[in-house]
Amino acid sequence: DASAGESATAIAIWRRAVAATHDFLTPEDFAEIEAMVRGFLPEVPLTFAVDRDGTVAGFMVLSEGHLDALFIDPAAHGRGAGRALVAHALARFPRLVTDVNEQNAGAAAFYARLGFTVAGRSERDDQGRPYPLLHLVHEAADAAATAAQMGFNGQPILTKGRDGQNLMSGRVTMIDLG
């Protein structure tokens, strides 16, 4: 499991990111989703993007070719943390899929810029709420070249597994996050 500190960091980033990008959520849905997030984030492998000063800029949850979650602290938007995490995921899984809320236009545009295409759409989110999802796919013929084009420098990103042990050592150095 992620340490209590790592989970708290991820949850704090999730809260700030969702508050900044998910203005379509009702307060009740936000609270319900947050309770779910608080339950599952400590149980899943978390991958953090960390800047040169050791500040966590964002995190992702990746499972066998599915990008389950990608959240970047709003203070780090536009500075390469999301791009680095996606590049890292693509280096591991050349065919990467993810879902994005259709109402989150900024995230949809972000994924489109990185080469994801819409493979489908659902009228409701995974819990049956009226928040349509776009199902995205990225199919890289050359995953290493794609990751390099996206700026992934080959340095491992700090990843913790379910048992709290490092799955990979080291941290990615983000450019211009200061």
Image (spheres, helix red, strand yellow):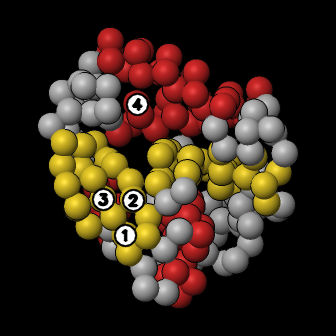
Distance between mark 2 and mark 1 Cα atoms:
6 Å
Q: Earlier in the sequence, mark 3 or mark 2?
A: 2
Asked whether disc 3 touches disc 2, contact meaning CB atoms under 8 Å apart, the reply is yes
Which quarter of the image is occupied by the C terminus?
A: bottom right
Residue at (26%, 67%) from the top-left corner? Answer: 117
Distance between mark 1 and mark 3 Cα atoms:
7 Å
Distance between mark 4 and mark 2 Cα atoms:
24 Å
Asked whether disc 4 touches disc 3, contact meaning CB atoms under 8 Å apart, the reply is no
Residue at (52%, 81%) from the top-left corner? Answer: 143
Q: Is residue 16 above or below residue 157?
A: above
The residue under label 2 is: 97
The residue under label 1 is: 138
The residue under label 3 is: 136
Residue at (32%, 25%) from the top-left corner? Answer: 127
- At mark 1, the secondary structure is strand
Q: Earlier in the sequence, mark 1 or mark 4?
A: 4
Amino acid type at image mark 3: Leu
